[in-house]
Amino acid sequence: MNTRNQTFVKKALFAMMFVGASAQAVPFTYTGSIVDYTITTSGVYDLTAAGAQGGSGNGVGTTGGLGAQISGDLFLTTGTQLGIVVGGQGLTGNFGGLAGGGGGGGSFVYIIGSTSPLIVAGGGGGAGYIDATVGGGGQTTTSGQAGFGAGGGAGGSAGSGGAGGNDEIGDNGGGGGGWGGNGGDGVGTTYTQTGGAGLGGAGAFSFLAGFGDCDPSVPACANGGFGGGGGGGWQGGGGGGGYSGGGGGDGTTDGGGGGGSYIDASFLSIGSMIGGSDTSDNGAPLGNANNGFVNIDMVLLSNPVPEPLTLALMAIGLAGLGFIRRKKARI
């Protein structure tokens, strides 16, 4: 057997020996509740989280901010139990009354029982009610974005919830929930009345959305999205949920701020860090629209145990390589 043929045979045998070591991808979409997931095989996993978009407002061009998208590679061991939260899009305030949109929910992945998350992608802020008062995009920093307008609520920091809008007239958006605390309620009358303010979204471990202003004649409410989105006020948008919550929008016209994102120091590498307001070179938006998502993809096995078929192929491969070596020894 010549050298060229031996090289070809070696490549074929090695390919046979490593059949079955392919990646495993597990996608998670919006359900409105926490989903538990157990790692069944130790290895390096790519975790991707995308926050949800904020709700639109009543006016023309009043779109909710897009969610952030964060990814990285992390080593996880067999039996690790994960909690998965996929953020929901904030509800629209365009239901006949003058209402801002609800804030989008953040998406979270955490080890059950841990006091800190693994990865969080912030949700976008809800839009204000008037023309072109858009919500803020999910942030790539850990801090939440402040709500827009003079009376916009402060964004949360270090895992806290965002503050509700505080314009004295009322009708303000609620702040988005953060990992370590709930968002603040917007200043104004009770959310159950037309002309009311939005309530703050909740943090870990309920991640509930804040209630928004309602129109009893429809009926419809500008609620935030699951994952801590703040409720929209009669005119101000709700803040996005995230590691730190976005602030609620000013109750005169303005949108809510986007929620903050987070990636733990235990990650081996960081992949994408895309903010909800980021654009491509040609101006196309890069943030996540609609509901959020989480993907868990195995990219590298750790000490894989061969299956019976793989063991048989390995035996054939080793025997073949031994034959090549003996053949060479006789030459």
Image (tube, rainbow, N blue to C red):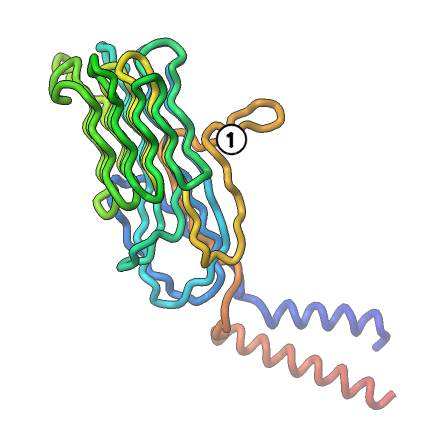
Number of numbered discs present?
1
Residue 314 in the figure: left or right of residue 139: right
Residue 215, picture quadrant: top left
For residue 25, above or below residue 150 = below
Residue 194 in the figure: left or right of residue 275: left
User: Helix, strand, or loop for circle 1?
Assistant: loop
Q: Nearer the viewer, residue 163 or 94?
A: 163
Residue shown at 53% from the left, 73% from the top: 310
Q: Which of 291 and 175 is in front in this view?
A: 175
Q: Can residue 106 be seen in this view?
A: no
Query: Which quadrant does the C terminus fall into?
Result: bottom right
Residue 277 in the figure: left or right of residue 8: left
Query: Which quadrant does the N terminus fall into?
Result: bottom right
Residue shown at 35% from the left, 46% from the top: 108
Q: Which of 103 and 260 is in front in this view?
A: 260
Residue 155 % position (x, y): 34, 32
Q: Can residue 45 be seen in this view?
A: yes
Residue shown at 59% from the left, 81% from the top: 315
Q: Which amino acid does label 1 sit on?
A: Leu
Residue shown at 62% from the left, 79% from the top: 316
Residue 41 % position (x, y): 42, 66
For residue 91, above or below residue 36 = above
For residue 100, above or below residue 160 = above
Residue 177 % position (x, y): 27, 37
Residue at the spot of label 1? 286
Residue 61 in the figure: left or right of residue 283: left
